[in-house]
Amino acid sequence: MSATTAPLAGSGSVAEDRKPGFASLMLSEWTKIRSVRSTVWSLAILVVFTLVFTALFLKMGIANWDKTDPAQQAEMRLDPTGTILGSGILLSQLAVCVLGVMAIASEYSTGMIRASLLAVPRRVPVLAAKGAVFALLVLAVGELTAFGSFFIGAPIMNDKAPVSIGDPGVLRAVVGCGLYLALLGLFALAVGAIVRHTAASITVVIGFVLVITPMAGLLPGSVGERIHAWLPTQAGFMITQQHSRAGDLLGPWEGLGVLALWTAVLLAVAVAQLRRRDA
C-alpha cells in the first residue's frame, strides 16, 4: 500500500509546485497587455495627444487672457499647476477609463477569461494580477504624461502665472496626477469585471464621469455640494490642484482617498461576483 500511495503523494506535490505564483500571473498579464497592439498604440497616442492638447489649450488661454473673466484669471494665478494638468487630463481620463474596461471585459466577450481561470482555479489572484499590472502601467504612463504636461505648460504660463516644480504643492500635484489616473483605471477595470460586457461597462464608466458627476454639481444646497464632492472623479481630481480653491470640501489627499475607497468597494464587489458566477 505504501508503494502505491507514494507516487500519488509525489505527483500531488509536483502539481502543487506547478501552480503559478503571483509573479508568474503578473508576467502573464503583462504579456497579454503588451501583445495587444491596440493597447500599446492607444497609450502612446494618449501621451502625445494629451501633451499637444495641453499646449494648445494653454496657448489659447494666454492669447485670450485680456478677455478672460478676472475671477478666472485670479484662479489661474492661484493654481497654475491645476490649470496646466487640467487642460489635457479630460482626454487622459477618458482613454484610461476605456482601456480599464477593455482590459478585462474584452476577455469575457472573447471567452479568453475561461482559459485564465482554468490555469488558475483560484480566481481572485487572476483579478489581482490583472489589476496590479494595469495599474502600474497606467501609473507609469500617467506620470510621464503629467510631468510632460507640466514642463510644456509652465513656460507657456510663465508671463501670466509663473510656476516652478519646486513651488509648494507642485510636485505633489504632478505626481498625484499619475496616481489619480492609475486609480481611475482600476475603478474602470472593476466596473468591467462586474458588468462583464465591454460596451455596457464603457457606457457606465463614461456616463459616471461625464454625466452624473457634472449633473451632481447642479444639486442645490449643502447636501448637493457634499454629494458632488464625494463622487469618485471629482474627489480624486483634487490631488492635481496645487492649492485648495474656494468651496473645496476635501483636501488633495482626502480626495484621492475617496477615489481609492470607491475603487476598493467596486473591486470587492468584483471579487465576490467572480467567486460566485461562472466565467
Image (cartoon, rainbow, N blue to C red):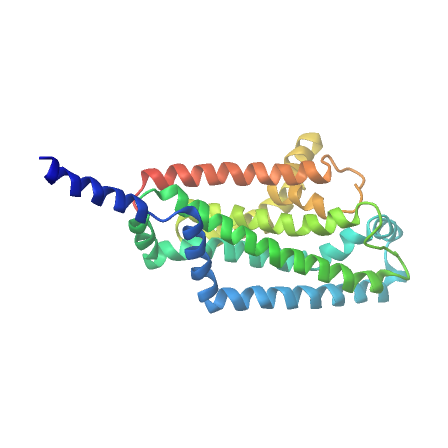
Q: How many labels does the image show?
A: 0
Percent x, y of residue 265: 50, 36
The quadrant of the picture occupied by the N terminus is: top left
Tell which of 173 and 50 is nearer to you. Answer: 173
The image quarter in which residue 257 lies: top right
* Residue drawn where x is 57% and y is 55% of the image: 138
Percent x, y of residue 271: 41, 39
Is residue 203 something one can see in this rendering? yes
Percent x, y of residue 54: 73, 63
* Residue drawn where x is 30% and y is 52% of the image: 114
The image quarter in which residue 68 lies: bottom right
Residue reaching furthest to the front: 3
* Residue drawn where x is 55% and y is 38% of the image: 262
Residue reaching furthest to the left: 1
* Residue drawn where x is 66% and y is 34% of the image: 224
Is residue 231 something one can see in this rendering? no
Tell which of 3 and 192 is nearer to you. Answer: 3
Percent x, y of residue 12: 23, 42
